Amino acid sequence: MSGTDSSHDASVISQTHTPDTGLQPEQDVVGPEAHAVMADPVLPVTPAPVPSAPPSPEGVAVKEVFQMVGAMVFVFCFAALGFNAMYHAGY
């Protein structure tokens, strides 16, 4: 048993993969006549992207203020829940 075998596959006989040597080399190579027969690839036509207007700085500032207030309310409620749990636990 080699050093890389684990206990659950110790009974499996390791086999080495041997490539098939019966392939003919002309099957692997695409000749110029095959390229002439192939059709051109189809490229999908998509419309150009429409540029969007940038958001106003006032709107972004208002959203940030509401997000900050929401975060402060969340922290306050979480702290109140913790203090309530400590009160009922007897600390």
Image (tube, rainbow, N blue to C red):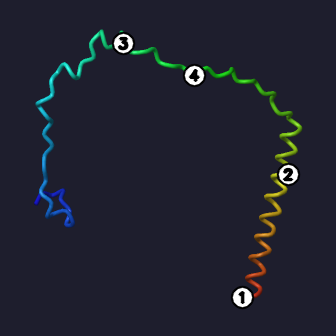
- Inspect the image, locate mark 1, and give the three-letter code of the amino acid beneath it: Ala
Q: Which residue is drawn at 70% across and 24% down?
A: 49
Residue highlighted by disc 3 = 37
Residue highlighted by disc 2 = 66
Viewer-proximal residue among 42 and 66: 42
Q: Earlier in the sequence, mark 3 or mark 4?
A: 3
Residue highlighted by disc 4 = 44
Residue 1 place in picture, x, y as percent: 10, 60
Nearer the observer, disc 3 or disc 4?
3
Q: Residue at x 19, y 66 (%)?
A: 7
Marks 3 and 4, Cα distance to the nearest angstrom? 22 Å
Q: Residue 63 carries which label?
A: none
Marks 4 and 2, Cα distance to the nearest angstrom? 43 Å
For numbered disc 1, what is the local secondary structure?
A: helix
Q: Earlier in the sequence, mark 1 or mark 4?
A: 4
For numbered disc 2, what is the local secondary structure?
A: helix
Q: Residue 89 carries which label?
A: 1
Nearer the observer, disc 1 or disc 2?
2
Q: Earlier in the sequence, mark 3 or mark 1?
A: 3
Marks 1 and 2, Cα distance to the nearest angstrom? 34 Å
Q: Which residue is drawn at 12% across and 57% down?
A: 13
Q: Residue at x 34, y 12 (%)?
A: 35
> Label 1: few (<14), some or many (≥20) within 10 Å?
few
